[in-house]
Image (spheres, rainbow, N blue to C red):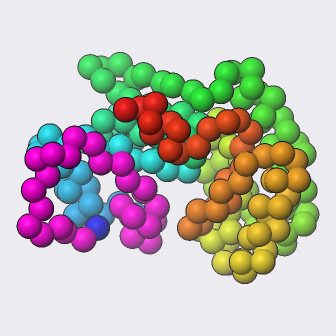
Amino acid sequence: MKPVKNFDGASIKFLFTDIDDTLTDNGRLGADAYGALWKLKSAGISVVPVTGRPAGWCEMIARMWPVEGVIGENGGFYFRYHKGKMHRYFAISEQERKKSRLILDETIAPEILKSVPGCAIASDQFSRLLDLAIDFKEDVKPLSKIEVQKIVEVFKKHGAHAKISSIHVNGWFGDFDKLTTALLFL
């Protein structure tokens, strides 16, 4: 995270930021980035990470980081820890989440793994509630753009949304994304 010089943040109340390859370097949140989050909080600026990362990570981030809340799984939810209580908003109902999980896990995941050698289910998948994350670069040898696009095509063939991040392709069912949930958060 690079410092901003000559910045007057008096008019900024909220700062929405990505996590992977924005706040982190090589998959790690460094002391400078974490310190910057505390400085922003002290300056009265509410930071809200917006990420494709899973619910399990977001629960910890909302509780432990100096942030106002966190939007996760590409807008599938936001979590906000406020006055000693976790507040959770989900973009789709529990019934829709269960139906979606079944299709993602039993139909789409096996098809992607068979169709695109070298990809893998993301190592953080066990912490996810709404989406399926396919690793193409985090813990596997990087795949080509053509191979990554094949992953996207399988999601879309089944009517799922697909988003390419710097390390994963995330797929989900539901009418949500990072922007719509960020606007709801505000």
Any part of residue 3 in sight: yes
Vertical relation: 103 (above or below) 132: above
Which quadrant of the rendered structure holds the N terminus? Answer: bottom left
Which quadrant of the rendered structure holds the C terminus? Answer: top left
**Going by the image, does 146 lie left or right of 180?**
right
Q: Residue at x 63, y 71 (%)?
A: 137
Pinpoint residue 157: horizontal percent, then vertical percent: 88, 53
- Magenta stretch, overall SS: loop
Pinpoint residue 86: horizontal percent, then vertical percent: 40, 23
Pinpoint residue 6: horizontal percent, then vertical percent: 8, 67
Q: Residue at x 60, y 29 (%)?
A: 91
Vertical relation: 121 (above or below) 10: below
- Toward the viewer: 86 or 172? 172
Q: Is residue 19 magenta?
A: yes
- Toward the viewer: 75 or 24? 75
Q: Residue at x 53, y 45 (%)?
A: 178
Which residue is outermost to the front?
A: 11
Total numbered circles: 0
Q: Residue at x 36, y 61 (%)?
A: 23
Q: Is residue 13 magenta?
A: yes
Q: Report the magenta residues as a range.
A: 2-27
**Going by the image, does 169 lie left or right of 84?**
right
**Going by the image, does 12 lie left or right of 122?**
left
Vertical relation: 106 (above or below) 92: below
Pinpoint residue 42: horizontal percent, then vertical percent: 12, 43
**Going by the image, does 83 lie left or right of 119?**
left
Any part of residue 60 in sight: no
